[in-house]
Image (tube, helix red, strand yellow):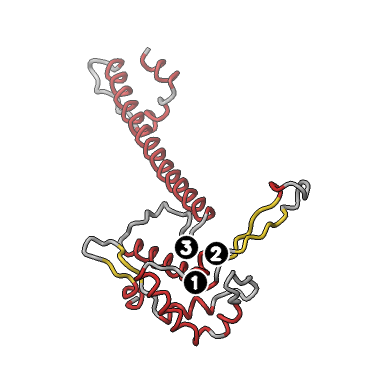
Amino acid sequence: DNKKANMLQTDPDEFLTTVQFPAFRVQQKLENLRVSSSPGPDGIHPRLLKECAAEFSIPLSIIFQKSIEESVVPADWKCSNITPIYKQKGGRTEAGNYRPINVTSVPGKVMESIIKDSVIEHLQINSSILPSQHGFFPGRSCTTNLISYLNAITAAAKIMRWALAFLRSFACNFLLFTNVNTAARVNSTTAQPSGPAKPVSITTAYEMSAPSKNIAALR
Protein backbone atom coordinates (compact mmCIF):
# COMPACT_ATOMS: atom_id res chain seq x y z
CA ASP A 1 0.00 0.00 0.00
CA ASN A 2 2.84 2.40 0.78
CA LYS A 3 4.42 1.67 -2.61
CA LYS A 4 1.12 2.42 -4.34
CA ALA A 5 0.73 5.67 -2.41
CA ASN A 6 4.23 6.76 -3.39
CA MET A 7 3.36 6.30 -7.06
CA LEU A 8 0.67 8.96 -6.80
CA GLN A 9 1.77 12.57 -6.44
CA THR A 10 -1.20 14.78 -5.59
CA ASP A 11 -1.63 18.32 -4.34
CA PRO A 12 -3.88 19.39 -1.44
CA ASP A 13 -6.80 19.70 -3.86
CA GLU A 14 -6.52 15.96 -4.58
CA PHE A 15 -5.56 16.36 -8.24
CA LEU A 16 -3.30 13.86 -9.94
CA THR A 17 -0.29 15.93 -11.01
CA THR A 18 2.22 13.28 -12.08
CA VAL A 19 2.85 9.53 -12.18
CA GLN A 20 5.84 7.65 -10.85
CA PHE A 21 7.35 4.62 -12.61
CA PRO A 22 9.17 2.53 -9.99
CA ALA A 23 11.29 -0.32 -11.28
CA PHE A 24 9.30 -2.97 -9.41
CA ARG A 25 6.08 -1.93 -11.16
CA VAL A 26 7.76 -1.93 -14.58
CA GLN A 27 9.17 -5.39 -13.87
CA GLN A 28 5.73 -6.69 -12.92
CA LYS A 29 4.28 -5.41 -16.19
CA LEU A 30 7.10 -6.95 -18.22
CA GLU A 31 6.71 -10.34 -16.52
CA ASN A 32 3.00 -10.37 -17.41
CA LEU A 33 3.52 -9.76 -21.13
CA ARG A 34 2.13 -12.31 -23.59
CA VAL A 35 4.92 -13.79 -25.64
CA SER A 36 2.47 -14.57 -28.46
CA SER A 37 1.91 -10.86 -29.14
CA SER A 38 3.52 -9.21 -32.12
CA PRO A 39 6.23 -6.56 -31.80
CA GLY A 40 5.58 -2.97 -32.78
CA PRO A 41 7.38 -0.79 -35.32
CA ASP A 42 10.45 -0.66 -33.07
CA GLY A 43 10.94 -4.43 -33.46
CA ILE A 44 11.19 -5.12 -29.70
CA HIS A 45 9.56 -8.51 -29.14
CA PRO A 46 7.51 -9.14 -25.98
CA ARG A 47 9.39 -12.40 -25.34
CA LEU A 48 12.68 -10.50 -25.03
CA LEU A 49 11.18 -8.06 -22.53
CA LYS A 50 9.52 -10.86 -20.56
CA GLU A 51 12.60 -13.04 -20.32
CA CYS A 52 14.80 -10.08 -19.33
CA ALA A 53 12.26 -8.26 -17.16
CA ALA A 54 14.65 -7.70 -14.25
CA GLU A 55 17.36 -6.28 -16.54
CA PHE A 56 15.05 -4.00 -18.55
CA SER A 57 12.97 -2.73 -15.61
CA ILE A 58 15.44 -0.07 -14.42
CA PRO A 59 16.33 1.51 -17.81
CA LEU A 60 12.70 1.50 -18.90
CA SER A 61 11.70 3.05 -15.58
CA ILE A 62 14.14 5.91 -16.22
CA ILE A 63 12.88 6.36 -19.80
CA PHE A 64 9.24 6.42 -18.67
CA GLN A 65 9.94 8.96 -15.94
CA LYS A 66 11.90 11.28 -18.24
CA SER A 67 9.20 10.99 -20.88
CA ILE A 68 6.40 12.08 -18.57
CA GLU A 69 8.46 14.81 -16.91
CA GLU A 70 9.57 16.35 -20.20
CA SER A 71 6.31 15.61 -22.04
CA VAL A 72 8.21 13.90 -24.83
CA VAL A 73 7.35 10.51 -26.32
CA PRO A 74 9.84 8.51 -28.41
CA ALA A 75 9.08 8.65 -32.12
CA ASP A 76 8.75 4.87 -32.43
CA TRP A 77 5.97 4.90 -29.83
CA LYS A 78 3.90 7.20 -32.04
CA CYS A 79 3.94 4.75 -34.96
CA SER A 80 1.94 1.57 -35.33
CA ASN A 81 1.56 -1.36 -37.68
CA ILE A 82 -2.03 -1.69 -38.91
CA THR A 83 -3.02 -5.07 -40.33
CA PRO A 84 -6.46 -5.73 -41.91
CA ILE A 85 -8.13 -8.91 -40.62
CA TYR A 86 -10.95 -10.52 -42.59
CA LYS A 87 -14.27 -10.70 -40.68
CA GLN A 88 -15.17 -14.09 -42.18
CA LYS A 89 -18.24 -12.69 -43.90
CA GLY A 90 -18.91 -10.95 -47.20
CA GLY A 91 -16.62 -10.63 -50.16
CA ARG A 92 -12.90 -10.36 -49.63
CA THR A 93 -12.73 -7.55 -52.17
CA GLU A 94 -14.82 -5.23 -49.96
CA ALA A 95 -12.82 -3.06 -47.57
CA GLY A 96 -15.72 -2.94 -45.09
CA ASN A 97 -15.37 -6.68 -44.49
CA TYR A 98 -12.02 -6.19 -42.77
CA ARG A 99 -11.24 -4.89 -39.29
CA PRO A 100 -7.96 -3.10 -38.58
CA ILE A 101 -5.59 -4.47 -35.94
CA ASN A 102 -3.34 -1.80 -34.44
CA VAL A 103 0.06 -3.02 -33.17
CA THR A 104 2.10 -0.41 -31.31
CA SER A 105 5.36 -0.46 -29.40
CA VAL A 106 5.39 -2.87 -26.45
CA PRO A 107 7.34 -0.53 -24.11
CA GLY A 108 4.89 2.24 -24.98
CA LYS A 109 1.94 0.02 -24.04
CA VAL A 110 3.66 -0.87 -20.76
CA MET A 111 3.96 2.83 -19.94
CA GLU A 112 0.30 3.40 -20.84
CA SER A 113 -0.73 0.51 -18.59
CA ILE A 114 1.13 1.96 -15.60
CA ILE A 115 -0.44 5.38 -16.19
CA LYS A 116 -3.89 3.79 -16.37
CA ASP A 117 -3.32 1.89 -13.10
CA SER A 118 -2.17 5.08 -11.38
CA VAL A 119 -5.24 7.00 -12.53
CA ILE A 120 -7.58 4.24 -11.32
CA GLU A 121 -5.78 4.02 -7.96
CA HIS A 122 -6.06 7.79 -7.58
CA LEU A 123 -9.79 7.67 -8.28
CA GLN A 124 -10.26 4.82 -5.81
CA ILE A 125 -8.29 6.54 -3.04
CA ASN A 126 -10.39 9.70 -3.41
CA SER A 127 -13.67 7.76 -3.83
CA SER A 128 -14.26 9.39 -7.19
CA ILE A 129 -15.80 6.30 -8.80
CA LEU A 130 -19.39 5.43 -7.98
CA PRO A 131 -20.26 1.84 -7.04
CA SER A 132 -22.61 1.80 -10.03
CA GLN A 133 -19.65 2.22 -12.42
CA HIS A 134 -19.00 -1.17 -14.00
CA GLY A 135 -17.62 -0.37 -17.45
CA PHE A 136 -13.90 0.16 -18.04
CA PHE A 137 -13.11 -0.74 -14.43
CA PRO A 138 -10.92 -3.63 -13.17
CA GLY A 139 -12.87 -6.51 -11.70
CA ARG A 140 -16.21 -5.24 -13.02
CA SER A 141 -18.11 -5.92 -16.22
CA CYS A 142 -21.59 -6.21 -17.67
CA THR A 143 -21.99 -9.41 -15.65
CA THR A 144 -21.32 -7.66 -12.32
CA ASN A 145 -23.70 -4.90 -13.39
CA LEU A 146 -26.50 -7.42 -13.99
CA ILE A 147 -25.76 -9.19 -10.69
CA SER A 148 -25.88 -5.88 -8.80
CA TYR A 149 -29.17 -4.99 -10.45
CA LEU A 150 -30.62 -8.42 -9.65
CA ASN A 151 -29.57 -8.07 -5.99
CA ALA A 152 -31.27 -4.68 -5.78
CA ILE A 153 -34.47 -6.04 -7.29
CA THR A 154 -34.41 -9.06 -4.94
CA ALA A 155 -33.88 -6.85 -1.88
CA ALA A 156 -36.74 -4.59 -2.96
CA ALA A 157 -38.99 -7.62 -3.46
CA LYS A 158 -38.17 -8.87 0.04
CA ILE A 159 -39.02 -5.47 1.53
CA MET A 160 -42.24 -5.43 -0.47
CA ARG A 161 -43.20 -8.88 0.86
CA TRP A 162 -42.61 -7.74 4.42
CA ALA A 163 -44.67 -4.62 3.76
CA LEU A 164 -47.53 -6.66 2.29
CA ALA A 165 -47.42 -9.06 5.23
CA PHE A 166 -47.59 -6.14 7.65
CA LEU A 167 -50.51 -4.59 5.76
CA ARG A 168 -52.38 -7.92 5.73
CA SER A 169 -51.81 -8.33 9.45
CA PHE A 170 -52.94 -4.78 10.12
CA ALA A 171 -56.01 -5.23 7.94
CA CYS A 172 -56.97 -8.49 9.68
CA ASN A 173 -56.55 -6.95 13.12
CA PHE A 174 -58.53 -3.88 12.11
CA LEU A 175 -61.31 -6.04 10.65
CA LEU A 176 -61.36 -8.21 13.78
CA PHE A 177 -61.58 -5.14 16.04
CA THR A 178 -64.37 -3.70 13.87
CA ASN A 179 -66.33 -6.97 14.00
CA VAL A 180 -66.04 -7.13 17.79
CA ASN A 181 -67.46 -3.63 18.13
CA THR A 182 -70.20 -4.36 15.58
CA ALA A 183 -71.18 -7.56 17.31
CA ALA A 184 -71.24 -5.78 20.67
CA ARG A 185 -73.53 -3.07 19.32
CA VAL A 186 -75.84 -5.64 17.72
CA ASN A 187 -75.96 -7.64 20.93
CA SER A 188 -76.72 -4.57 23.03
CA THR A 189 -79.54 -3.62 20.65
CA THR A 190 -81.21 -7.03 20.63
CA ALA A 191 -80.72 -7.75 24.32
CA GLN A 192 -83.67 -7.60 26.78
CA PRO A 193 -83.84 -4.43 28.86
CA SER A 194 -84.09 -6.36 32.13
CA GLY A 195 -81.11 -8.65 31.41
CA PRO A 196 -77.39 -7.99 31.00
CA ALA A 197 -75.77 -7.78 27.57
CA LYS A 198 -74.54 -11.06 26.15
CA PRO A 199 -70.72 -11.14 25.89
CA VAL A 200 -69.22 -11.48 22.42
CA SER A 201 -66.27 -13.80 21.91
CA ILE A 202 -63.39 -13.34 19.46
CA THR A 203 -64.57 -16.46 17.61
CA THR A 204 -68.00 -14.99 17.11
CA ALA A 205 -66.49 -11.76 15.80
CA TYR A 206 -64.20 -13.67 13.44
CA GLU A 207 -67.15 -15.65 12.08
CA MET A 208 -68.86 -12.34 11.32
CA SER A 209 -65.97 -11.20 9.12
CA ALA A 210 -67.77 -12.14 5.90
CA PRO A 211 -69.76 -9.24 4.37
CA SER A 212 -72.97 -11.29 4.15
CA LYS A 213 -72.78 -12.18 7.83
CA ASN A 214 -72.11 -8.57 8.75
CA ILE A 215 -75.19 -7.46 6.82
CA ALA A 216 -77.29 -10.20 8.35
CA ALA A 217 -76.09 -9.24 11.83
CA LEU A 218 -76.88 -5.58 11.27
CA ARG A 219 -80.39 -6.52 10.17
Vertical order, 179 against 88 (above or below): above
Vertical order, 211 against 21 (above or below): above
* Residue under the point 57% across and 73% down: 42
Amino acid on which the number 2 mark rests in the picture: Cys
CB atoms of marks 1 and 3 within 8 Å: no
Q: From the image, tell me which residue sits under label 3.
A: 138
| Residue 60 located left or right of residue 182 | right
Are there few (<14), some (14-19), or many (20+) residues within 10 Å of tag 3?
few
Vertical order, 91 against 20 (above or below): above
Q: CA distance from mark 2 to mark 1?
A: 15 Å
Which residue is most to the left? 12
Q: From the image, tell me which residue sits under label 1.
A: 110
Amino acid on which the number 1 mark rests in the picture: Val
Amino acid on which the number 3 mark rests in the picture: Pro
Which residue is most to the front? 75
Expressed as whole percent of the image width and height from the top left, the position of residue 15 reads 28, 61
Expressed as whole percent of the image width and height from the top left, the position of residue 203 reads 39, 32
Q: Quadrant of the N terminus?
A: bottom left
Between marks 3 and 2 in the image, the one whose residue lies nearer the viewer: 2
| Residue 37 located left or right of residue 27 | right
Q: CA distance from mark 1 to mark 3?
A: 17 Å
Q: From the image, tell me which residue sits under label 2.
A: 79
Expressed as whole percent of the image width and height from the top left, the position of residue 104 reads 56, 66
Which residue is most to the bottom? 55
Task: Give SS at disc 3.
Answer: loop
Vertical order, 153 against 18 (above or below): above
Q: Which mark is residue 85?
A: none
